[in-house]
Amino acid sequence: MKASVYGSLLGVLLVGCSASQPSPELPTESTQVEQDIQQEASLQDDAEPAAEEIVIQVEERFQRGALILDIQDVRLAPNQITVRVELSNPSSRVIRFYPNQGHLSTGRDELKANIFLTDDALSGVLDPQEQKSGVLIFSSRFEQELDFSNVRSIQLSLGEVIDMASIEPEQVNIAFSLD
């Protein structure tokens, strides 16, 4: 008797489930491709400055040990500062450098590099004759609005260039003007 009751309940549940609303369509391959194209287009749009963003061309070159660091531009946004850089290792030795753990100072604000938004490719090993480029993003704490009214220069503390052939790592502390 219990078996027939359970069998009847199971039948009601199965009928009830099949009568429910149809499941939404799973994305097809073509809709996935369209989504990928839209996402790529939005990433390219991110390269354009936002309306409230100030872009300053810097074009400064610094050398610390075997590392050459070219700063191309700085973008000042309400809650972050982005520094576009190119790193190169013209030496014949492998070096290590981790700028995604650095700090930036405007004289008024101290910002830490946002390890999650900064280009991963910039940090780590630079092989001999290798070049890397990308952005370092320094975010304000708690999305706090930054005041750039009196900012004339930026100081970067980007850690050390570690050359396995050298005993002493070279500190990368640089300053440059925004004028």
Image (tube, rainbow, N blue to C red):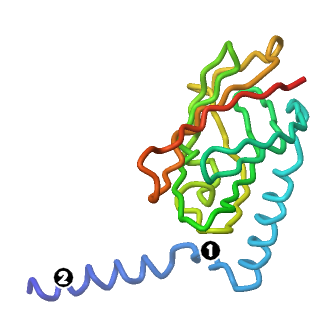
Disc marking residue 24: 1
Identify the residue shown where x is 62% and y is 55%.
Answer: 122
Q: Position of residue 29 (x, y in %)?
A: 70, 86
The answer to whether 117 is drawn above or below residue 27 in the figure is: above
Where residue 6 is drawn, which disc sits there? 2
Q: Position of residue 72 (x, y in %)?
A: 83, 45
167 or 24: nearer the eye? 167
Residue density around tag 2, few if under 14, some if 14–19, many if 20 or more, within 10 Å: few
In the foreground, 21 or 9: 21
Identified by mark 1, the residue type is: Pro
**Mark 1 / mark 2, whichever is N-terminal:** 2
> Where does residue 33 sit, x and y in percent of width and height?
76, 79
Residue 172 x, y percent position in the rendering:
59, 38
For marks 1 and 2, give the CA distance: 31 Å
Q: Nearer the viewer, residue 157 or 5?
A: 157
Q: Mark 1 or mark 2: which is in front?
A: 1
- Which of the numbered marks, if any, corresponds to residue 10? none
